[in-house]
Image: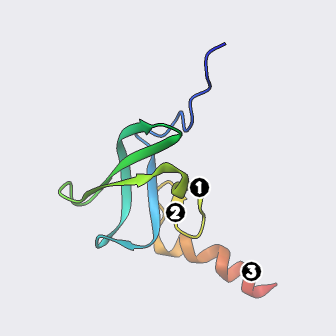
């Protein structure tokens, strides 16, 4: 039986950083690299293709750091505001 690939949909996925990262919030995964048990994603800023960096793909699962898809600031604040109302 073939070994299940970690993060199978990583390549081409879009992400929003909760905090500005290298001056930007919106990134896309343009490359992936497997190193032993670790998977790394090469991120590129959607508005500035000169901004590129590698990140451990496991960090993308941390909701305090990243959110899947491209979110507006308003969309990012919405869940926080809903929690404050409770």
Residue in view at x 59 percent, y 62 percent: 62
Crowding at label 1, few (<14), some or many (≥20) Cα neighbours within 10 Å? Answer: few
Residue in view at x 49 percent, y 49 percent: 57
Q: In the visual, does 42 lie left or right of 7? A: left
Residue at label 3?
83
The secondary element bearing badge 2 is classed as strand
Q: Residue lying farthest front?
A: 36
Mark 2 or mark 3: which comes first in sequence? Answer: 2
Q: Residue lying farthest top?
A: 1
> Residue 70 occupies which quadrant of the picture?
bottom left
Residue at label 2?
66
Q: In the visual, does 4 lie left or right of 45? A: right
Do the CB atoms of the residues marked 3 and 1 lie less than 8 Å apart? no
Residue in view at x 52 percent, y 55 percent: 60
Q: Nearer the viewer, residue 62 or 86?
A: 62
Do the CB atoms of the residues marked 1 and 2 lie less than 8 Å apart? yes
Q: Nearer the viewer, residue 65 or 47?
A: 65
The secondary element bearing badge 1 is classed as helix
Mark 3 or mark 1: which comes first in sequence? Answer: 1
For the residues marked 2 and 3, what is the alpha-carbon distance in whole angstroms? Answer: 19 Å
> Residue 21 occupies which quadrant of the picture?
bottom left
Q: In the visual, does 25 lie left or right of 66? A: left
Residue at label 1?
61
For the residues marked 3 and 1, what is the alpha-carbon distance in whole angstroms? Answer: 21 Å
Q: Nearer the viewer, mark 3 or mark 1?
A: 1
Q: Nearer the viewer, mark 2 or mark 3?
A: 2
Q: Nearer the viewer, residue 31 or 73?
A: 31
Q: Is residue 11 above or below residue 48?
A: above
Pinpoint residue 14: horizontal percent, then vertical percent. 44, 50
For the residues marked 1 and 2, what is the alpha-carbon distance in whole angstroms? Answer: 7 Å
């Amino acid at each position: 039986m073939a070994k299940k690939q970690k993060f199978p949909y990583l390549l081409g996925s879009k992400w929003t950083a909760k905090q500005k990262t290298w001056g930007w919030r919106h990134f896309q995964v343009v490359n992936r690299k497997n190193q032993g048990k670790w998977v790394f994603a090469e991120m590129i800023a959607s508005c500035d293709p000169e901004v590129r960096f590698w990140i451990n793909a496991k960090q993308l699962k941390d909701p305090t750091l990243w959110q899947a898809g491209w979110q507006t600031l308003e969309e990012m604040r919405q869940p926080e505001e809903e929690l404050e109302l409770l």
